[in-house]
Amino acid sequence: MLYFIEVVLPLAVAKTFTYQVSEAEFDFVQIGMRVAVPFGKTKIYTALIVGKHNTPPQLYQPKEIHQILDEKPIVNELQIQHWNWVADYYMCTIGDVFKAAVPSGFILESETQLLPKEVENLPDHQLKDDEYLILEALRHQSSITLQEVVKILGKKTVIPTINSLLSKGAIALHEEMTEQYKPKLVRYIKLHVIYHQQEHLLELLEILSRAPKQRELVLHYFQLHVRERKPIAVKELMESSGASIAVIKALIDKDVFEEYYIHEDRVQFEKKEDASFELSLAQAAAFSAIEKGFQQQNVMLLHGVTASGKTEIYIKLIEQFLKEEQQQVLFLLPEIALTAQLVQRLTAYFGNQIAVFHSKYSNNERIEVWNNLLQNSENARVVIGVRSALFLPFSDLGLIVVDEEHEQTFKQKDPAPRYHARDAAVVLAKLHNAKVLLGSATPSLESYYNVKTGKYGLVELKERYGNVVLPEIQLIDLKDKYFRKRMTGHFSDVLLENIKETVHNGEQVILFQNRRGFSPYVECLTCGHVPHCPSCDVSLTYYKYKNQLKCHYCGYNIANPTHCHSCNSLDLNAKGFGTEQIEQELVRLFPDKKIGRMDQDTTRGKFGFEKIIDSFKNREFDILVGTQMLAKGLDFDNVTLVGILNADNLLNQPDFRAYERAFQLLTQVSGRAGRKEKKGKVLIQTYNPYHNTIQQVVNNDYAAMFQEQLYERKNFKYPPFYRIIRLTLKHKDYDKLKEGSLWMYNVLKQHLNIPVLGPEEPMVSKIRNEYLRTILVKIPAENHLGKTKKTIQKILNSFEAVSHYRSIKVSANVDYY
């Protein structure tokens, strides 16, 4: 009998592949284990086993596997089910999901090794200099890697040289798999077993009397051992005794101490003793309503105004699941910036039961969280993470909390899988028979519509914690202020006066401007020329600090021009304004105050967010300027004033969700003010103070915004009444793309009896030298979504089969909003 395994490769291929194994290997391997498999001519990839059977493939001769990489599964079957759902619903391949889900340290790729071969009659004069250097290196070591060849030759293109040596038969190539994860081993010491007896110990101290530093260290070891009553690390002993490593080494060489290593997690948290708190009456009522709701509904929406204390309710709910059910809990956040504050609050309460998972953590740290969950360890009862944490190997998931569920950052844009974490979380919870709590002060229209149709339960929390009043919101008409010449830079007289008063009282200010950089573009006042990115269809953003123009899509940058590239005029002017410009204006207006800035440019690096948030919390900054990172659930006690410099930027977007997003963002930013005893104030600068959405923000009227937007959505066939799939076509040849997109549109129109819009040039119609066209397919709620997607997939497969269009890249984005 023949034995086969079915595997998934971390590549964008739509199917699984069959490989042959021996009977012993077949009995040993399990679904969810990794194997190294040959794929293509020379490459070896890490593949994941998703099935075992005895049926040979019909279309190709199966290869044998290279090696088995795991002793037990690293992925469980519920995960594979969830991955299949993500691949199916979001129209991508299971390989895409596998690559996105697993930490890159688990996905090993082969490295090409060069081995020497014995060759007779190959005189040195027949070798070129580069070839001679490679062979000389191979005389001193058994093999070298491609990376080492690059270093030896000092150039990047080494393939021609290697091909030449291969043709002369001087070397052979071999593919080697390398494991990237290294566990953290901490060095500990203990007293040799013979010195546990009293007489031997006295004898030792007598011998060491001639080495006072060693004797002192041994005595210090005893003090530490009695006090701590736990294993003693070498680092800890050195720090507390002040001894050098040489003294410890001498005692190990004399067999006084024995050294050993313990595997430790790289990230550890400590619980605080005084972290307990009591829920207010409103919070307690909401908490019991959620408990009751979970008896009838699997998904509950907690709609609580900003600063109503939703996090405390989450903590009590998590505590209950850990106590009663002993289950795992997943806490999803939209932004890495939020994890810093939340981790502090939750670790104070739950200690080392917390694990954190996001992209700012190193590969090794993420693998440790993965392994802790696989082992159902006490160190990972509660996982805090951004959207990628959904793919972790949960075995006993009881609760998923999705905080700020309305946030658009829960949607993965590129690359595939283009999933929405909130929706995927609801499906994951269903697989585990777990509960989901969605929390927001400004719920998304889709979630609130699900409440209205009875799909989700609803709990409302209408008052702030500690009876703190909501901030007073005041509108400033920019048209009027500019007309009366009452503007200083981008600040109205009212906003400046309030900032002065607030900082004078020792309180802090947050200023919001949803654009980074100094100016969105630089314009020539003579001919109107604006410098554009040569690879993308966008103007270059001006950064004054670096004195350069930069593209936010591909990273292209040039020095700030001194003259116009079109007409050589010296009359250049920066138009519009971003966070960098606001920061510089504030430095000029308030020279004696500390100004901070929080945007994508200032939060690079692992601890970028923590540094800025902690500095502001510790009152090292008086004024903090930032983009929408500031709007998401951050809690600062001393902020009493929030200024929004231009609300119209948010309203005037070419997007059907513009007004909903503007309402959410303005309400969330306003909610950062007056979160403790002092009453907060919010000043919104706008050219259109009577706009419906801005009036709804002032009156905190979510219901009116919901009704108005729902009416519009129904009229114009948008979600939640229609599902939308956006197809994006890319190619370097504009004419070929135009022709291909028209072919696609016509075939879709022919086969689907539903609205198909396009092909349309998007707002940014060229990125990284590739032109873009989009086609929108609107699927009514009553139509079968699965069947429509199957029809679209067949059309995409037919498109790829046309040789003329094969080079056009097509990506499908389901629920792209």
Image (tube, rainbow, N blue to C red):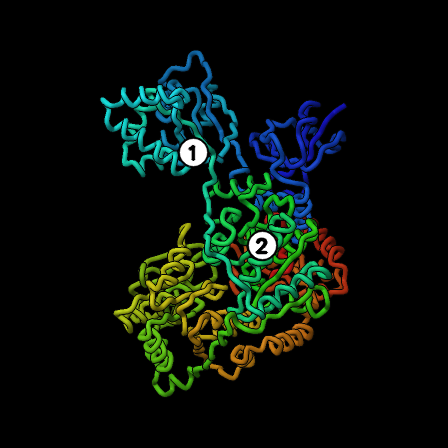
Whole-percent x, y for residue 129 in the image: 35, 25
Whole-percent x, y for residue 772 in the image: 56, 58
Q: Amino acid at mark 1?
A: Pro
- Label annotation for residue 231: 1
Q: Residue at x 24, y 23 (%)?
A: 209
- Few, some or many C-alpha atoms within 10 Å of disc 2 (few <14, some 14-19, many ≥20)? some
- Few, some or many C-alpha atoms within 10 Å of disc 1 (few <14, some 14-19, many ≥20)? few
As helix, strand or loop, the secondary structure at mark 2 comes to helix
- Using the image as rendered, state which of residue 192 and residue 689 is in the foreground: 192
In the rendered image, which residue does mark 2 sit on? 319
Whole-percent x, y for residue 527 in the image: 37, 72
Compared with 356, 27 (above or below) is above
Q: CA distance from mark 1 to mark 2?
A: 31 Å
Find residue 610 and report its image quarter. bottom left
Can residue 259 be seen in the rendering of this structure? Answer: yes
- Using the image as rendered, state which of residue 343 and residue 12 is in the foreground: 343
Find residue 459 and report its image quarter. bottom right
